[in-house]
Image (cartoon, grey):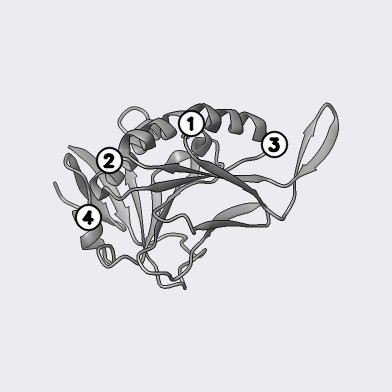
Amino acid sequence: MKEVWISEEGDFSEIENDGFYHFYLYKFEEVDYQEENKQLLLDFLGKLDIFPLYVMVEGHDEEEEMRQIFDSLGYSYSVDYFTDKRMYSTGGKNFTYHPPFFQIEASSMEELQLIMTETYHLATQNQFYGISFKNNVQLTSQGGFSFPKLSRNKDIAALKVGHDGQGFYFYSNMNSLQNIGQAISMLPEGYVVTQINDRVIEK
């Protein structure tokens, strides 16, 4: 069995006052936590089986490289730009830019798997990497940090991958995901919860 930790605690301050239930889900690593947590995310979304999904990725100064990745996939995507500026240095010179924000649509599990195969490395580099269940979830940026801006529309759910690809934070106002019991029931086959918040579950 694959052991996971689920927690309702932690830093959910970005949107915690907007009526969303939230939890953090993490796969205790055995070999490669980034790959194992990517698979946990895929398995969890496969169990939910809600499509289309929208993969949201923040870019830095490598916009052209990211466009090439998304173009090669051949799926529908859009790109917007944050209003704040970031800075990078190259060749001894400093440059400023408006970070791009890509959103690519996955209409099936097969498409989502391919998108994540090509792009999940961006999450492990601590670029914002999230997935929404509706395409009206936007990113906002303050002080050099990006986070999802969620509305109170009915049946919205979104997630963001944790630091260095360690687990993911899930936000929901769906009736089917409003407490930790419902969240645990959505775990795919083969996973077992061995820690809830700070409480270790005896095996």
Count residues near mark 2 (Cα–Cα under 10 Å), then give few for <14, some for 14-19, many for 20+: some
Could you tell me how far apart the alpha carbons at marks 1 and 4 are, in whole angstroms?
35 Å
Q: From this view, report whether residue 115 is shown above or below residue 156.
A: above
Who comes first in sequence, dot 3 or dot 4?
3
Find numbered disc 1 in the image and state the secondary structure of the residue it sits on: loop
Tell me whether the residue at label 3 lies in contact with that at label 2, contact meaning CB atoms closer than 8 angstroms. Answer: no
Find numbered disc 4 in the image and state the secondary structure of the residue it sits on: helix
Q: Nearer the viewer, residue 4 or 136?
A: 136
Q: Amino acid at mark 3?
A: Asp
Can you tell which quarter of the image residue 34 is in? top left
Could you tell me how far apart the alpha carbons at marks 2 and 4 are, in whole angstroms?
13 Å
Count residues near mark 4 (Cα–Cα under 10 Å), then give few for <14, some for 14-19, many for 20+: some
Residue 174 lies, in percent from the top left, at 31, 65
Q: Tell me the mark number nearer the camera, choosing from 2 and 4.
A: 2
Who comes first in sequence, dot 2 or dot 1?
2
Residue 73 lies, in percent from the top left, at 48, 29
Q: Nearer the viewer, residue 12 or 83?
A: 83
Residue occupying the point 64% across, 44% down: 100
Q: Amino acid at mark 1?
A: Gly
Label 1 sits on residue: 74
Can you tell which quarter of the image residue 127 is in? top right
Label 2 sits on residue: 43
Tell me whether the residue at label 1 lies in contact with that at label 3, contact meaning CB atoms closer than 8 angstroms. Answer: no
Find numbered disc 2 in the image and state the secondary structure of the residue it sits on: helix
Q: Nearer the viewer, residue 155 or 167?
A: 155
Could you tell me how far apart the alpha carbons at marks 3 and 2 are, in whole angstroms?
32 Å
Q: Point out which mark residue 152 bears.
A: none
Q: In the drawing, does residue 201 fall left or right of residue 17? A: left
Find numbered disc 3 in the image and state the secondary structure of the residue it sits on: loop
Label 3 sits on residue: 61
